[in-house]
Amino acid sequence: MRDSGTGIHGEVTERMFNPFYTTRAVGTGLGLAIVHRIVDAHGGRVSVSNNGPRRGDGATVEIIIPRRQGHAVKQSQEHGRAET
């Protein structure tokens, strides 16, 4: 995911995956902590990088989850859900 916001700088970079850490006035600060835990449990990784050196250049979040060997997923035509 890529955005054109302020980017992620300083303390935020170090703490953004900690539970209950937030930079917003409302919210629990659990969103990224939950994402990180789920991705990690599946052997994946979450990486965050700024799109440039200045605030306002935005940031990119990349989520990589490896495919399991020998595990095929087919799309259900009837329900539109993935089946294993």
Image (cartoon, helix red, strand yellow):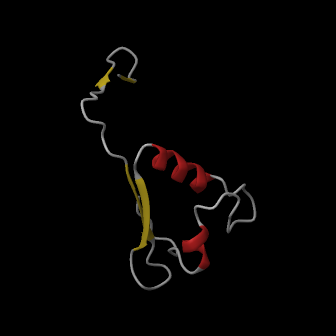
Residue at image position (50%, 71%) is 5
Which is nearer the eye, 81 or 33? Answer: 33
Task: Give how far across and how far down residue 20 sits, in percent.
Answer: 71, 59
Quadrant of the frame with the C terminus: top left
Residue at image position (66%, 53%) is 30
Which is nearer the eye, 69 or 14? Answer: 69
Residue 30 drawn above or below residue 70: below
Residue 32 drawn above or below residue 12: above
Residue at image position (27%, 27%) is 72
Which is nearer the eye, 43 or 84? Answer: 43
Total residue callouts:
0
Task: Give how far across and how far down residue 12 sits, in percent.
Answer: 59, 73
Residue furthest bottom as drawn: 54
Residue 69 in the figure: left or right of residue 6: left
Residue at image position (58%, 61%) is 17
Quadrant of the frame with the N terminus: bottom left
Residue 68 drawn above or below residue 29: above
Quarter of the image where one finds residue 32: bottom right
Residue 75 drawn above or below residue 38: above
Residue 15 in the figure: left or right of residue 4: right
